[in-house]
Each structure stands twice: as C-alpha cells, then as structure tokens.
Image (cartoon, grey):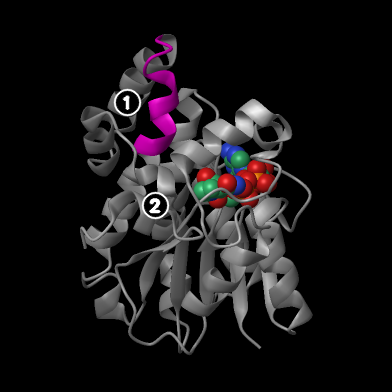
Amino acid sequence: SRTYVITGAASGIGRTAAEILTARGERVIGVDLQGVDVSGDLSTPEGRLAAAEEAAGLAGGTVDAVIACAGLSIPKPITASVNFFGMTEFLEAIRPALTRSEAPRVALVSSMASMQPVVPSLVDALLADDEAAVDEIATRMAEDPRTANVIYPSSKRAISRWVRREAPTERWAGAGIPLNAVAPGTVVTPMTKELLASDEGRALTDAYVPMPLNSHQGPESIAHLLIWLTSIENSHCAGQTIYCDGGADAVLRGEDV
Ligand code: NAD
C-alpha cells in the first residue's frame, strides 16, 4: 500500500479523500488543526514545519503522496497565509520524504475562484514568499469591504501560478514528482454550508460559478480526481490546474483555450 499525507483531513474534501483511500487499503496520515493523526496549525511557519516533520516521522521517513486541501475562505489575512504558505511551505518541508518514494505524487486544491479578479500585489507577494508583505497587504484588504473578498481568489491564483512555476523544476519534475492542482467549482462541504443554505446565497454562488453538469456535488467529486493525480497511474500530468467544476470554466471562458 502507499502512504498518503492529507492536509485538511478533518473535514470536507480532505476528509473524503482520506476515507476513500483508507477504504482501499492505503495508509493515510491526516493533518489538521485537530481530530486527525497530526494536529498542527498551517497558518504559522513553525506550525507548517512541525506538522510536516511529524507527518514524515509517522510515515517512517517515506511519503508516497501529499494531497494538500487545508484552506479557509473567510475574508481575513489568515486565509492568504493558510491557503498559500500552508500548502507551499508544508510541501517544501515534506519534500525530502517524498523523494524517498518510488512513485511520489503531489496534488493541491486551488479553486475556480482563481479566475476571478485578484489584487496583483497580493499574488506577487505570495509568490515572492514575502509573508510580512502578504500580512500587510491582506490586512489592508480585509479592512475594505470592496477588497476583503478578493483575498481568497488572490490566494488561489497564487497557488495555480506556483504549481505552474514549480512543477517543471529540478525540485519536482526533476525529482520525478508530478505536481498538479485541482480547481473545484462550488462543492457541498462545511466551507460552503452557510452560503448554500439560503436562496440568495445559492443564486449569488451560481451566478459566479455556473455548473451545467450535475450542479452542486459533494466532496467525492473532487476527491477522486485528487486521488488519480496522486496515484501511480499519473506518470505524465504535471504543472496543471484541472478544473473540476461541472463545466463552469467552459461556460465562463468559452473557447478561449
Ligand atoms: P472544509 O472547511 O470542510 O475543510 C477545510 C479544512 O482545512 C478543515 O478541516 C480545517 O480545519 C482545515 N484548516 C483550516 N485552517 C487550518 C490551519 N490553520 N491549519 C490546519 N488546517 C486548517 O472545506 P473544503 O470545502 O473541504 O475545502 C478544502 C479545500 O478546497 C480548500 O483549500 C478550499 O479552499 C478548496 N475549495 C473548496 C471549494 C468548495 O466549494 N467547498 C471550492 C473551491 C475550492
């Protein structure tokens, strides 16, 4: 069996991926604030490092795949920190354990929201690994209702760009590690529960993310793709953000391929 480390494994997409893999007989080491194998806070540099070290230790030094799901969608600076550094720094820290696997794989969760308008200075600060600048810009954005909700799309744009920039390098493709992201549309999880509970919330969400195929789906719709991307079968897909969104990207972007 393969050993998977899954962040955000206590809820939603991460939890579902962990359940499917465990049922298939794979070994899963979950990372989350609480309630799984490794309790850790991915919003701080120390938390990311400690969680990566503990997960790699529990795995016995060799990790076959990482599925990075942990994330937040609240209009606060911590969303930028968890969604970006909570994935990228965690992955950098656990990379040595991946290089010991015979078939290492990594998949991250981006979002359809990565295509929405962003604040370029925040995206640039994230990609420059400048956490102090990120805090400063995101704090200013959070104070203004016109920009507070742009923190989330900016963090996800940065994730998709990071995957594209990193995947072909020596650290990932050069080490035989396919690195990809999945961009979900609107998924029914605790993250979207409140939003989807009211008619207004649903109408607003569906206007941003129109999903002609099967509309609102549960977390298994995303988990299966994350599992394929991190399976041995994926030997050639790298650097992609794959939209798993009921056709929303095709509706919004049309033939602009
Ligand atoms: P969820 O809220 O059910 O799960 C997210 C998990 O991340 C939770 O268990 C939470 O405790 C964990 N987490 C949050 N902050 C953390 C921290 N500081 N340290 C460690 N763990 C932390 O949400 P979900 O819908 O399963 O979301 C999973 C991923 O999918 C997120 O990255 C989210 O942005 C992305 N996504 C979700 C949707 C959707 O519609 N649900 C759409 C697009 C993208």
Which of these two is toward me, 226 or 77? Answer: 226
- Tell me if 32 is positioned left or right of 46 in this view: right
Which of these two is toward me, 167 or 74? Answer: 74
Give the residue number, with chain letter if any, for mark 2.
88
The tag on residue 132 is 1
The tag on residue 241 is none
Mark 1: which secondary structure?
helix
Q: Quadrant of the N terminus?
A: bottom right
> What x and y, as percent, mark residue 128?
22, 40
Q: Main secondary structure of the magenta part?
A: helix
Q: Is residue 79 visible in this depiction of the protein?
A: yes
User: Residue at the spot x=48%, y=72% of the render?
Assistant: 97
Residue 202 shown in magenta: no
> What x and y, as percent, mark residue 46?
50, 40
Earlier residue among tags 2 and 1: 2
Range drawn in magenta: 144-154
From the viewer's perspective, is residue 226 above or below residue 250?
A: below
Q: Quadrant of the C terminus?
A: bottom left
Mark 2 surroundings within 10 Å by alpha-carbon count, few (fewer than 14), some (14 through 19), many (20 or more): many
From the viewer's perspective, is residue 160 above or below residue 106?
A: above
- Tell me if 102 is positioned left or right of 203 in this view: left
Mark 1 surroundings within 10 Å by alpha-carbon count, few (fewer than 14), some (14 through 19), many (20 or more): few
Q: CA distance from mark 2 to mark 1?
A: 16 Å
The response on whether ligand 1 sits within 8 Å of label 1 is no
Disc 2 to disc 1: CB gap under 8 Å: no
The mark total stands at 2
> What x and y, as percent, mark residue 144?
39, 10
User: Residue at the spot x=60%, y=72% of the render?
Assistant: 224
Q: Is residue 70 visible in this depiction of the protein?
A: no
Q: Amino acid at mark 2?
A: Thr
- Tell me if 159 is positioned left or right of 107 in this view: left
Q: Amino acid at mark 1?
A: Ala
